[in-house]
Image (spheres, rainbow, N blue to C red):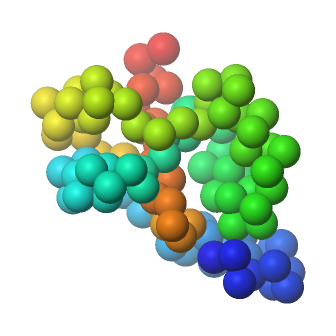
Amino acid sequence: MHENFDVEPDVLKAKIISETARINWLELQKFYASGSVVQVSAQLDLVEVAFAFSQDDKAAVQNWLQAGLVDRVSDAQAQLWVEQKAELWAVVISPWILVQDKAAQATH
């Protein structure tokens, strides 16, 4: 989505919202295996994080990474989602697939 630098922020956010959907973790396995799946903490707004990725906002992404709020999905987390047959919110911001487990928020 890096070609969207010239798109109005509200238009781009609306596009991101329209492309965000629930998906079963099993359908994301091949992308996880290639290292393309990024987990977004339930504390963050998935659309805002996706927008930052689409705008190549390195400062925001770096802050989230350092705070542990955004990271590649760990093997342990991936296995847990397989066992739970988890459904996650996901959006593609090429080359990444951002996922968020809102169910985790309910259990914390």
Q: Is residue 99 above or below residue 31?
A: above
Percent position of residue 74, x then y: 37, 30
Percent position of residue 72, x then y: 47, 39
Residue shown at 81%/73% (left/top)? 10
Percent position of residue 4, x then y: 74, 81
- The image quarter containing residue 51 is bottom right
Q: Is residue 16 left or right of residue 56?
A: left
Q: Nearer the viewer, residue 92 or 24?
A: 92
Q: Is residue 79 left or right of residue 73?
A: left
Residue shown at 25%/40% (left/top)? 86
Residue shown at 23%/27% (left/top)? 80
Q: Is residue 57 left or right of residue 70?
A: right
Residue shown at 41%/17% (left/top)? 107
- Res. 74 visible in picture: yes
How many numbered callouts?
Answer: 0
Q: Is residue 90 above or below residue 11?
A: above
Q: Residue furthest front?
A: 34
- The image quarter containing residue 83 is top left
- Res. 51 visible in picture: no
Q: In what quadrant of the picture does the N terminus appear?
A: bottom right
Q: Is residue 82 above or below residue 1?
A: above
Percent position of residue 96, x then y: 50, 60
